[in-house]
Image (tube, helix red, strand yellow):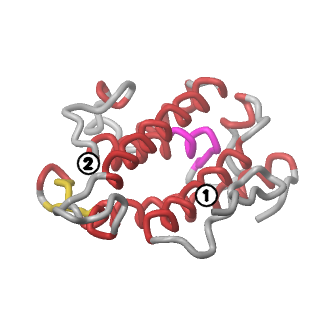
């Protein structure tokens, strides 16, 4: 087995020829590393700054906090089956502000936002390692496509989603927000790159 290739920004390249689980996780980790790259070395003030004249008010700090929430929602709560979300999500009044993750980031400093995101990603990796490694039928290899097909209740039990769906959704979520991060970072300091 060959070592993973890391690009000049420190991102692990997804495997070129691997199983489904390793491929999905490879792309997700590459995109996570892209977000890390786009938000690294920025001050609290820079993470709070939005694009001038842009109505959304999106910031890189808000993006980090949102992705922290999304990680915990899909992996800790849905796939992991946690009875409650970890802090700070466990006390949020989402009825009062459905975009609390984005808005409340204005009150957090850079170190807090980075630590929150890192902790959420680490919890997600632990949940996926357990879920993807568990054989689901006798004679099934750990990490097989069958383990990706196991479903988990989502949206308050209104539907169930497979680990495959969650991983694919998270690749989509990070890919979309990586594009946002590109634009926000370039507006802050002129940094560009894929």
Question: If the image is split into quadrants, where does the C terminus sit?
Answer: bottom right
Q: Which residue is mark 2?
A: 78
Residue 22: x percent and y percent?
50, 63
At mark 1, the secondary structure is helix
Q: Which mark is residue 74?
A: none
Of residues 70 and 16, the one nearer the viewer is 16
Mark found first going from the N terminus, 2 or 1: 1
Residue at position x 57%, y 28% in the image: 115
Name the residue rendered at 12%, 58% in the picture.
158
Res. 106 image quadrant: top right
**Residue 171: x percent and y percent?**
50, 63
Label 2 secondary element? helix
Establish if 26 lies above or below 52: below
Magenta includes 62?
yes
Q: Tell me the magenta residue range.
A: 57-65
- Compared across the picture, whether 63 is left or right of 37 comes to left
Q: Residues within 10 Å of mark 2 (few under 14, many from 20)?
A: many
Between 40 and 10, which is closer to the camera in this rendering?
10
Q: Judge whether 193 appears above or below 187 on screen.
A: below
Where does residue 150 sit, x and y in percent of width and height? Answer: 22, 61
Task: Decide whether residue 4 is among the magenta residues.
Answer: no
Determine which residue is flagged by label 1. Answer: 31
């Amino acid at each position: 087995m060959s070592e993973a290739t890391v690009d000049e920004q420190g991102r692990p390249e997804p495997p070129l020829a691997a199983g489904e689980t390793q491929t999905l996780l490879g792309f997700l980790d590459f995109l996570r590393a892209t977000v890390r790259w786009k938000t690294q070395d920025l001050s609290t003030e820079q993470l709070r700054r939005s694009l001038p004249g842009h109505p959304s008010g999106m910031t890189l700090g808000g993006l980090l906090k949102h992705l922290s929430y999304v990680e915990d929602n899909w992996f800790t709560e849905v796939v992991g089956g946690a009875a409650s979300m970890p802090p700070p999500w466990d006390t949020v009044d989402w009825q009062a502000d459905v975009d609390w993750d984005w808005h409340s980031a204005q009150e957090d400093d850079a170190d807090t936002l980075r630590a929150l995101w890192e902790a959420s990603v680490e919890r997600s990796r632990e949940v996926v390692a357990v879920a993807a490694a568990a054989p689901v039928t006798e004679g099934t290899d750990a990490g097989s496509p069958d383990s990706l097909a196991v479903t988990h209740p989502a949206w308050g039990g209104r539907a169930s989603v497979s680990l495959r769906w969650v991983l694919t959704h998270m690749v989509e979520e990070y890919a979309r927000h990586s594009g946002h991060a590109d634009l926000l970072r370039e507006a802050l300091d002129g940094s560009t790159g894929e």
